[in-house]
Image (spheres, rainbow, N blue to C red):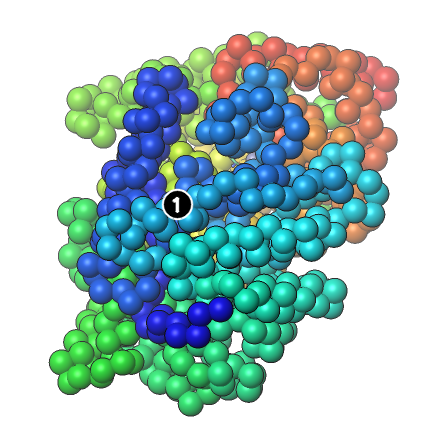
Amino acid sequence: MNHSLPPIGSTVLGYPRIGPERELKRANESYWAGRIGQDELEATARKLRARTWTELATAGLDSVPGNTFSYYDQMLDTAVLFGAVPRRFHGLSELDTYFAMARGRDGVRPLELTKWFDTNYHYLVPELAPDTTFILAGDKPVSEYREATELGIATRPVLVGPLTFLLLAKSAAGAAAGFTPLDLLDPLLDAYAELLARLADAGVAWVQLDEPAFVADRSGAELAALGRAYDRLGALSHRPGLLVAGYFGDFGEALPVLAQSPVEAVAVDLVAGSAAAIPVVTALRDKTVVAGVVDGRNVWRTDLKAAASTCASLLGSVGSLAVSTSCSLLHVPYDLDAETKLPSALRERLAFARQKVAEVVLLGQALSAGSSAVTARITAASETVRAGRAAEPRNDHVRGRIAALRPQHRRRVPYAARAAAQRDRLALPPLATTTIGSFPQTTDVRRARADLRAGRIDEATYTDRMRAEIRRIIALQEDIGLDVLVHGEPERNDMVQYFAEQLEGFATTEHGWVQSYGSRCVRPPILHGDVARTEPMTLDWITYAQSLTGKPVKGMLTGPVTILAWSFVRDDQPLALTADQVALALRDEVRDLEAAGIRIVQVDEPALRELLPPRAEDRKSYVDWATGAFRLATGGAAASTQLHTHLCYSEFGDVIEAIDGLDADVTTIEAARSHMEVLADLRAIGFARGVGPGVYDIHSPRVPDVAELAELLSASAAAVAPDRLWANPDCGLKTRGYPEIEPALRNTVAAVREVRARL
Ligand code: GLN
Ligand code: ZN
């Protein structure tokens, strides 16, 4: 291996790739629709890559990451690179195979999509089986390296590390019992070894291997596998320098393992994790440590003075120190300069990807040369950040309410008493039917929202159109025969943004897009100040809907944890406090809904599991504040008001106690795909409140028939008493069309009638 490695100096672990104007999204979607050919798509991709490398090199980074581009997802890239393409995708061109794995194709189901650690990015889950053979099937990292050298830029190719790749993969359906993807480590390492040799041939000095799977708890066997893998890759005679990166938390026990391996450099997340372990691991004294001090997943400017002093404190404990972002900048928008409408005081406090690169460069200069000019810039920047934070207006009313909170604010009367009061007031039949909230968003509805935003229609016209939609949705539900109705959420662009736009303390961006998966991007609101509700947020729509029917209409709110999870949150106070502020705003909304005669309120928490910390030791405190915030939002409701919540998953695993801790009267969840298994999990923990296991899988266009729905419902009725059991779809109907949901809901009602008759 090359013994004269250039210093890493300053770098970032990765960069956004969707394009500052979402060029890749448009190009991908045009290619999928057949409007452009492969050549044009590739030309767009090349342009985006060149632009990124040039921007990063020009900004002054010492080491520019490469291979951070992806048409869809880096886990998918890795699977394809090493030939892990399940048989059902064979027979298409290379690019079309790739997209088929991501999106499916006539009757061929795609790879599963799931959350990338605790972020809102989703990756495609590789499917591996005992007979999966890894070969170096592609050369993307090498060819992109060459592409960059043509521009005079020597990049550091970024790869998903072999352990993280296997630990995030799943066993293919039908794989032998006892098989786990980790069994394939040795053949996978052969393929990595070949890739490393090719990269060395091409002249690559450093590669980055991402191993974020090791910031979560790992077994002894997994840690041993990590050591074995990097001993082996490190021992290769012909390879680039190896930088192993962990992010979204602390490497923990994996840090000494890596330090004792022959890898030359380790990147650590000093934003989500801490620097405390570094001096303790003496083997780091002859490694390069890449200090991730600039937050890669939030939008705040860095307190550069604090970051520089963290770096300085490590100098004596490591062989060589480099400075970086805590993780890839994939999770933040491109460029703050594109935001012209943000209040200037807030803008002063923000840094998007491009601004964070400049911060890293400055810190790198401070570390290497430390001229007085650099020190002065760092000091000035820190002062701006600190002054900006201090100048953020405080809402003393909200702070006073928080200070006055007592345990009883988070407590309702015991469930048995609530259930009795609700039975009397609602008089619902056993196996009551409902939906999760949203109805399909028609083009007319979307157009009306866009027209209002663009000023083409006035507020009154907009309200008329939304009301017409609500009338239609209520009439449809009555006709179908559902018991508990919803207004359908036509006025909501997004379940978090809708509330963020109305709450004080939030700002929304114009161009702050972040890739969520593939071509899908989201624009997370920025929660920057004390949160307060200035006026009711949902009341008019819900009471209008309720005025149209005698059946109960559910008030529909997004819960505090989900609002936080899908926003950029302030980092100057504990999340628990921010969550309580959001909860108070929701609590006031619940009170207003109740006062207007609304008998059922649903508070959605689909992101409850998402924020669960990677390490078990941190989970209790998370669950405490998360459920505490939910109970603060809902704890003011009268016993006779029925509180629903909705969660978007069926495998509760580590959050099952949290679900109990929400103390909702009714919890609706996903279940159709796992054949109601979730009911047994709930029973195991003694969960004894209302539950609505989704019987209709809305993630598929398929319409379930009456017999299969009745079968699922009977299975459920055997596990849960019928007066606590609900029949509902898996999730909101927003992404489906009326031709699917209408028969599916009619079939659900018919199946419920059958099952009721047999009770
Ligand atoms: N009430 C929301 C809806 O129906 C819930 C969405 C979600 O769970 N993600 O759309
Ligand atoms: Zn859902």
Q: Residue at x 77, y 24 (%)?
A: 713
Q: Residue at x 53, y 71 (%)?
A: 263
| Residue 514 visible in the current orientation | no
Estimate the x, y position of residue 699 in percent, counting from the top left: 58, 27
Q: Which quadrant of the figure has residue 519?
A: top left
Q: Dot 1: within a 10 Å radius of its alpha carbon, few (fewer than 14), some, or many (20 or more) residues?
A: some
Is 161 on the left or on the right of 696, as rendered? Answer: left
Is 385 on the left or on the right of 81, as rendered? Answer: left
| Residue 357 visible in the current orientation | yes
Q: Which residue occupies the foreground of this view, 700 or 205? A: 205
Q: Which residue occupies the foreground of this view, 214 or 568? A: 214
Q: How many marks?
A: 1
Estimate the x, y position of residue 661 in percent, counting from the top left: 66, 54
Q: Is mark 1 within 8 Å of ligand 1?
A: no
Secondary structure of the residue carrying numbered label 1: helix
Q: Residue at x 49, y 83 (%)?
A: 286
Q: Which quadrant of the figure has residue 667?
A: top right
| Residue that badge 1 annotates | 143
Of all residues shown, which one is farthest toward the bottom? Answer: 316
Quadrant that contains the C terminus: top right
Is 223 on the left or on the right of 734, as rendered? Answer: right
Q: Residue at x 51, y 57 (%)?
A: 196
656 is higher (above) or lower (below) than 592: below
Tell me the kind of residue under disc 1.
Answer: Ser
Estimate the x, y position of residue 335 in percent, counting from the top left: 24, 51
Q: Which residue occupies the foreground of this view, 181 or 727? A: 181
Is 149 on the left or on the right of 724, as rendered? Answer: left
Q: Which quadrant of the figure has residue 715?
A: top right
